[in-house]
Image (cartoon, grey):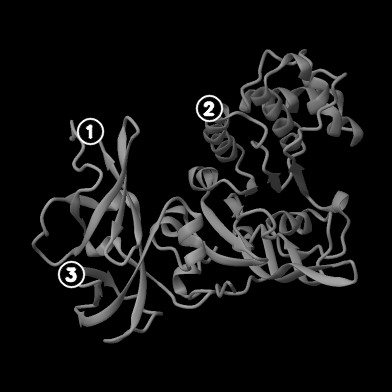
């Protein structure tokens, strides 16, 4: 996917610094030779990451997200394309000459050093004055909530505290961008969720650009200002978390971000900007038409709808919304919600999440014939073909 936002102005003293992206990738590709074959890890990425933005590269293992980050850091050089930091090309510039720091999943703290010495290590190597080191380390430890633990060693701290030390060590050098490669992966679920909130707070407080690599959709949705969803070396969709979740541009994005239902139908009519689809003999699906996706009567369309948007009712609902008959295959009680697995007439499996706040009993039992109902605005048409449609919904300017 190519970001079509206006090209940045580089080295123009007449423009405000904020007009230049913190990080830009222009046509970046990376290939390796393995056993005599050329393997493409990144197949053409164009990104512009704004200053002070929390930006996530999200995707499954092997999608190219970590390779992309390593090219930003300077640990890998692109096979083609350019990497810019604050408007200056850094392609070919070694990692230690780039004004970025990186935090890894393994924190790589010095076990024989105290928290203070770990955080001060980079400043001492740069010859920063002792008084300034004390001030800067104290300031950053306060931001990461480690004041009073300066004399502890890593072995005397929890995983979450060690992660904060690694963050403080990276931030104390005042980089213009911080790159984080799945830094929460070693933590347990509860601590990981707490650290997601803390990371976002720290990022806002220091005002530095964060680029975060993860395969965890929840992490990306929780923390990010924008997300680039990657698959097979390409960016499938780029946008804010709500847009990525509510309006997935491709089948891959719809399936990878959270839980999504994919239903197919044939267009029977177009009405006021909506397409009305038949689904089986009795089902009706209403979906707003995307500007970048042309459809007419007789065309087949695939539609995604999130499980929490669907309601289960006993009789066919009146009105102009979507209504699809189905049979309940399984009911799972989860405390705050009940999850229903239902099957439509053509064998499509649909998941429904219903909150239990207003339901003292299950609304349906296994084997019941029910109707699935949802509003047209909760349907989203997915482009046809293996790659889907990479249209305007996936483009976002800095």
Q: Please tell me how crowded label 3 is: few (under 14), some (14-19), or many (20+) other residues with Cα within 10 Å.
A: few
Coordinates of residue 348 in the picture (x, y in percent) = 35, 62
Coordinates of residue 198 in the picture (x, y in percent) = 55, 32
* Residue 165 is at least partly visible in this image: yes
Tell me whether circle 1 and circle 2 mark residues in contact (CB < 8 Å).
no
Residue marked by disc 2: 190
Of 273 and 150, nearer the camera is: 273
Q: Please tell me how crowded label 2 is: few (under 14), some (14-19), or many (20+) other residues with Cα within 10 Å.
A: few
Question: Alpha carbon of mark 3 to alpha carbon of mark 1: how far?
Answer: 31 Å
Q: Is residue 117 left or right of residue 357?
A: right
Tell me whether circle 2 and circle 3 mark residues in contact (CB < 8 Å).
no
Coordinates of residue 325 in the picture (x, y in percent) = 20, 61
Q: Is residue 53 left or right of residue 248?
A: right
Q: Of helix, strand and loop, which one carries label 1?
A: loop
Disc nearest the viewer among 2 and 3: 3
* Residue 305 is at least partly visible in this image: no
Instruction: Please give the label number shown on residue 90.
Output: none
Please determine whether, in this image, residue 332 is positioned above or below residue 150: below
Determine the residue located farthest toward the front in the rendered image: 367
Q: Residue at x 74, y 31 (%)?
A: 166
Disc nearer the start of the sequence (2/3): 2
Question: Alpha carbon of mark 2 to alpha carbon of mark 3: how far?
Answer: 45 Å
Please determine whether, in this image, residue 181 is positioned above or below residue 361: below
Disc nearer the start of the sequence (3/1): 3
Residue marked by disc 3: 282
Residue marked by disc 1: 357
Q: Please tell me how crowded label 1 is: few (under 14), some (14-19), or many (20+) other residues with Cα within 10 Å.
A: few
Q: Of helix, strand and loop, which one carries label 3?
A: loop
Q: Residue at x 57, y 36 (%)?
A: 205
Where, quadrant-wise, is the C terminus in this rendering?
Answer: bottom right
Q: Residue at x 89, y 37 (%)?
A: 126
Question: Alpha carbon of mark 1 to alpha carbon of mark 2: how far?
Answer: 24 Å
């Amino acid at each position: 996917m190519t970001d079509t936002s206006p090209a940045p102005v580089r080295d123009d003293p007449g423009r405000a610094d904020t007009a230049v992206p913190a990080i830009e990738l222009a046509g970046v590709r990376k290939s390796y030779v393995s056993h005599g074959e050329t393997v493409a890890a990144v197949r053409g990425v164009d990104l512009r990451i704004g200053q002070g933005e929390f930006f996530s590269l999200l995707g499954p293992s092997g999608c190219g997200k970590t390779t992309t980050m390593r090219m930003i850091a300077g640990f890998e050089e692109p096979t083609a394309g350019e990497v810019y930091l604050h408007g200056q090309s850094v392609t070919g510039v070694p990692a230690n000459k780039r004004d970025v720091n990186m935090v890894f999943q393994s924190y790589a703290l010095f076990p024989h050093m105290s928290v203070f010495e770990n955080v001060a290590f980079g400043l001492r190597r740069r010859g920063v004055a002792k008084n300034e080191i004390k001030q800067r380390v104290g300031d950053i430890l306060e931001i990461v909530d480690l004041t009073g633990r300066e004399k502890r060693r890593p072995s005397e701290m929890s995983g979450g505290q060690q992660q904060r030390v690694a963050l403080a060590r990276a931030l104390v050098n005042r980089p213009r961008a911080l790159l984080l490669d799945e830094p929460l992966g070693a933590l347990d679920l509860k601590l990981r969720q707490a650290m997601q909130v803390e990371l976002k707070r720290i990022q806002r407080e220091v005002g530095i650009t964060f680029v975060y690599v993860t395969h965890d959709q929840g992490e990306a949705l929780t923390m990010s200002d924008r997300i680039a969803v990657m698959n097979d070396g390409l960016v499938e969709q780029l946008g804010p978390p709500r847009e990525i979740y509510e309006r997935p541009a491709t089948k891959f994005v719809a399936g990878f971000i959270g839980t999504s239902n994919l239903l197919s139908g044939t267009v029977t009519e177009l009405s006021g900007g909506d397409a009305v689809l038949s689904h089986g003999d009795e089902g009706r699906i209403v979906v707003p038409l995307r500007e970048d996706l042309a459809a007419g009567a007789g065309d087949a369309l695939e539609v995604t709808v999130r499980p929490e948007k669907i309601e289960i009712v006993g009789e066919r609902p009146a009105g102009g919304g979507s209504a699809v008959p189905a049979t309940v295959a399984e009911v799972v009680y989860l405390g705050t919600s009940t999850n229903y697995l239902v099957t439509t007439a053509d064998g499509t499996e649909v998941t429904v999440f219903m909150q239990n706040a207003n339901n003292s009993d299950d609304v349906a039992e296994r084997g019941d014939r029910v109707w699935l109902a949802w509003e047209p605005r909760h349907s989203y048409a997915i482009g046809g073909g293996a790659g889907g449609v990479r249209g305007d919904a996936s483009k976002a300017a800095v």
